[in-house]
Image (cartoon, helix red, strand yellow):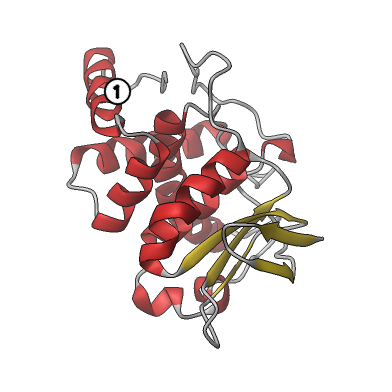
Amino acid sequence: MAARHPSCGLHEQAEPRSADLGSPDLGSPDLGFPNLGMGDHGLADHDIAARFNADVGRRYHACLLGGAVEPLYEPARAGLPARIHYRQDFAQSALHELAHWCIAGAARRALPDYGYWYQPPPRDPALRARFFAVEGRVQGLERLLAHVARVRFHVSVDDPGSDPLDFEARVMASARAWLARDLPPRTQAVLAALSPDWRQRLRVLAKVWSSQGSDSGCPI
């Protein structure tokens, strides 16, 4: 499926990746991450793309594009910006792919799909541990992006043979770790594009999580 966004001036065909760990249609349950007080005012996928492309994308020579069958990252080439393709019109997929982009260093951003490959389930214990180590960190940051964008968040396990509660705990621990640190400049830029009050929203979230203790879920 062709992906286009007018602020990027692009109209190209995305080659699909095997799975989107940030899409709400994968059947992954909402594992103890209630999204309280979100209402119906969250950003739509096209809002997320427009805000990113109008500011952050221009600064960092990158473009966020929806409408893809599967997510894909294409590095910049021949004068074109890097392209971050997310699935169809899924806001959570857009945020998941932005989380990948925020985490990837310069060397990774120079490689298609950041130099990673997708190993579908079933996975042996070693592969599962590596998969969860990467995805736990990505989804932890995605959780903060979703909070700021007021987008409903679901943990995506993508491994039927695993313990979903164990992965939920990993994502929760990662989200807390991201919240406790000084966020990198590109991540701050993405958060600012999503909402001008992002700092206040994250401060409130930190206070809520602190009051609930380490075993709590993730209210929005």
**Camera-side residue: 92 or 118?**
92
- Can residue 14 be seen? no
**Camera-side residue: 175 or 73?**
73
Residue furthest right as drawn: 1
Q: Position of residue 94 (x, y in %)?
A: 57, 47
**Camera-side residue: 64 or 126?**
64
Residue furthest bottom as drawn: 78
Q: Is residue 3 left or right of residue 184?
A: right
Q: Position of residue 108 (x, y in %)?
A: 43, 75
**Kind of residue indicated by mark 1:** Leu
At x 72%, y 60%, the residue is: 3
Q: Check the picture and name the quadrant holding the C terminus.
A: top left
| Image: 36 above or below 139 | above
Where is residue 102, by image quadrant?
bottom left
Q: Position of residue 86 (x, y in %)?
A: 64, 54
Q: Position of residue 54 (x, y in %)?
A: 46, 53
The count of marks equals 1
Q: Which residue is mark 1?
A: 205
At x 29%, y 35%, the residue is: 176
Q: Check the picture and name the quadrant holding the N terminus.
A: bottom right
Q: Is residue 60 left or right of residue 74?
A: left
